[in-house]
């Protein structure tokens, strides 16, 4: 684990690496997790299922045969454990303080990640086209401590059928230095390749693809303005900001439909108002 004395960039790099890797093998699973998933682990070993979070066969077995949710698979493989433990140690027990630290971490991450692949216009143009045609962009609510706290963060992502588009989604993930994942939505009956990024990571992508966007050509500058000083916002405050801009709280999909129909002058006024609200 990184210590608070390490340089910020080095610490963030180590945290991100550990978050992606999770536990190396069965021997690293903590006793309490082994006890919780005892039957699952025993069956995986008996059937020779690889202890590999990214392996499609492993994901299919756990999701369809054992009915584990994505959060349960994260817990079993230890994905995400390093970030929470690190910030708990650095910031102490007050939850709101940890949230502030995580927001600061996201801000630093945004400023320190140059995304070199997106500096090439052809790559930025390719990603913008993919987001416009197959992806989504806007704001999303995140809950922590079982819904005790609600925060709004910017996001962008792509979700496509894995059989048809795995290489495409993986390419997008490579450009933004994130990892795509395979998901098995029961309601859709097929596996999907999914790439989603939130907070500072999402905001870091926007300046690169903004010049080439069409469907989201106005959503991108709106998100950059609203989240220019922070990479998350308490739900209550964000509700007031959106209400001030649109007359009522609306989801980002509806907001995008509205701003696309605005004249240039109307949109300019909206951005100026958003700038003022972001600075308050």
Image: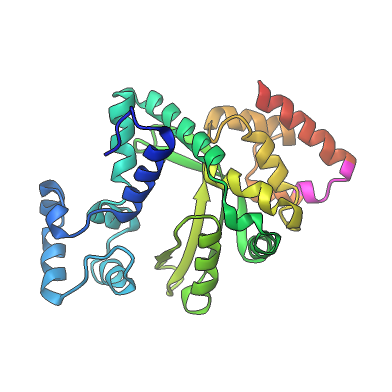
Quarter residue 100 falls in: top left
In the figure, is residue 233 to the left or right of 181? right
| Residue 239 against residue 46 in the figure, above or below | above
The answer, for residue 255, to whether it is visible in the render is no
Residue at x 12%, y 63% (from the top left corner): 39
Q: Is residue 261 magenta?
A: yes
Residue at x 79%, y 31% (from the top left corner): 272
Q: Nearer the viewer, residue 66 or 54?
A: 54
| Residue 60 against residue 175 in the figure, above or below | below
Percent of width and height locating residue 67: 27, 65
Quarter residue 6 falls in: top left
Look at the image and tell me in which quarter the C terminus lies: top right
Q: Residue furthest bottom?
A: 163
Number of disc labels = 0
In the figure, is residue 210 to the left or right of 182? right
Percent of width and height locating residue 117: 59, 58
Percent of width and height locating residue 235: 53, 32
Q: Nearer the viewer, residue 126 or 239?
A: 126
Colour convention:
rainbow
Q: Nearer the viewer, residue 16 or 241?
A: 16
Q: Is residue 152 magenta?
A: no
Residue at x 53%, y 74% (from the top left corner): 165
Magenta span of residues: 258-264
The answer, for residue 252, to whether it is visible in the render is yes
Percent of width and height locating residue 198: 52, 46
Residue at x 38%, y 32% (from the top left corner): 148
Look at the image and tell me in which quarter the N terminus lies: top left
């Amino acid at each position: 684990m990184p210590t608070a004395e390490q340089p910020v960039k080095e610490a963030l790099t180590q945290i991100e690496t550990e978050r992606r890797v999770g536990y190396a093998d069965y021997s690293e699973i903590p006793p309490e997790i082994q006890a919780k998933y005892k039957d699952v682990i025993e069956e995986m070993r008996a059937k020779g299922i690889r202890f590999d979070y990214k392996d499609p066969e492993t994901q299919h077995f756990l999701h369809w045969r054992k009915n584990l949710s994505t959060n349960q698979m994260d817990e079993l493989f230890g994905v995400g454990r390093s970030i929470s433990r690190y910030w708990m140690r650095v910031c102490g027990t007050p939850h709101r303080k940890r949230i502030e630290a995580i927001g600061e971490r996201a801000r630093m991450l945004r400023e320190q990640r140059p995304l070199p692949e997106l500096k090439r216009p052809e790559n930025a143009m390719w990603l913008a086209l993919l987001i416009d045609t197959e992806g989504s962009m806007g704001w999303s609510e995140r809950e922590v401590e079982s819904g005790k706290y609600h925060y709004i963060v910017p996001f962008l992502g792509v979700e496509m059928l894995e059989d048809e588009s795995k290489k495409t989604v993986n390419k997008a993930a490579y450009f933004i230095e994130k990892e795509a994942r395979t998901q098995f939505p029961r309601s859709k009956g097929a596996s999907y390749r999914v790439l989603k990024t939130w907070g500072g990571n999402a905001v870091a992508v926007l300046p690169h693809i903004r010049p080439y966007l069409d469907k989201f050509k106005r959503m991108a500058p709106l998100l950059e303005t609203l989240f220019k000083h922070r990479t998350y916002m308490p739900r209550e405050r964000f509700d007031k900001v959106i209400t001030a801009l649109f007359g009522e709280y609306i989801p980002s999909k509806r907001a995008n439909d509205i701003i696309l129909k605005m004249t240039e002058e109307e949109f300019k006024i909206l951005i100026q108002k958003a700038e003022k609200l972001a600075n308050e």
